């Protein structure tokens, strides 16, 4: 219904804010060499040696700590199963995922940031300045 979800135990978007991750790296005394941003899909089904419930497990990474807390506290003992039911309902409606030409479930585009950094004293021979 219209109930608000509980606050996240871990904010997986904490470093999504502009320059947040770069600031953490720079404050640790490292120099940033390169920052790349890109998007990619994640294949959720049809994988070799695909673990049971792989698609559900990937989709619930952001809320898994909350599900565990709700179950362990007794507040919502069936939290994971309820989430699984909601996931399957969304999939059956074609929401959150797509299917490629081979029929494999895909999610995305997923955004990522990759940062290459080094400790400041590691370029004593001038290799990176060339």
Image (cartoon, helix red, strand yellow):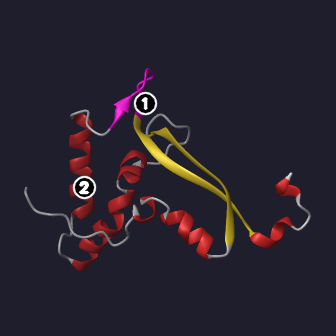
- Magenta segment, which residues? 97-105
Judge left or right: residue 46 versus residue 115.
left
Q: Quadrant of residue 123?
A: bottom right
Work out whether 84 lies above or below 23. Answer: above
Residue at 69 percent of width and 66 percent of height: 31
- Identify the residue at the far top of this view: 101
Q: Give the image location of residue 29, x and y in percent.
A: 67, 75
Q: Give the image location of residue 119, x and y in percent.
A: 74, 70
Judge left or right: residue 68 versus residue 6.
right
Work out whether 84 lies above or below 69. Answer: above
- Identify the residue at the far right of this view: 125
Residue at 30 percent of width and 69 percent of height: 8
In this view of the protein, which residue sits in the foreground, 82 or 6? 6
At mark 1, the secondary structure is loop
Mark 2 lies on residue? 83
- Identify the residue at the far front of this view: 129
- Sequence-wise, the earlier of marks 1 and 2 is 2
Residue at 27 percent of width and 60 percent of height: 80
At mark 2, the secondary structure is helix
Q: Give the image location of residue 115, x and y in percent.
A: 62, 56
Whether the magenta-drawn stretch holds residue 117 is answered as no
Q: Quadrant of residue 74?
A: bottom left
The quadrant of the rendering that contains the N terminus is: bottom left
Whether the magenta-drawn stretch holds residue 103 is answered as yes
Mark 1 lies on residue? 104
Work out whether 117 lies above or below 10. Answer: above
Work out whether 105 lies above or below 20. Answer: above
Judge left or right: residue 95 versus residue 65.
left
Q: Give the image location of residue 98, x and y in percent.
A: 35, 31
Count residues near mark 1 (Cα–Cα under 10 Å), then give few for <14, some for 14-19, many for 20+.
Answer: some
Q: Main secondary structure of the magenta part?
A: loop
């Amino acid at each position: 219904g219209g109930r608000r979800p509980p606050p996240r135990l871990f904010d997986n978007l904490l470093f999504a804010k502009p320059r947040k991750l770069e600031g953490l790296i720079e404050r640790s005394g490292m120099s940033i060499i390169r920052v790349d941003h890109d998007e990619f899909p994640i294949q959720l089904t049809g994988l070799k040696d695909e673990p049971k419930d792989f698609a559900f497990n990937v989709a619930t990474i952001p809320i898994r700590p909350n599900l565990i807390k709700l179950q362990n506290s007794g507040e919502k003992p069936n939290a994971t199963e309820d989430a699984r039911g909601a996931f399957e309902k969304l999939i059956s409606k074609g929401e959150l995922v797509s299917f490629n030409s081979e029929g494999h479930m895909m999610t995305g585009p997923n955004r990522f940031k990759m940062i290459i950094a080094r400790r400041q004293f590691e370029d004593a021979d001038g290799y990176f300045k060339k």
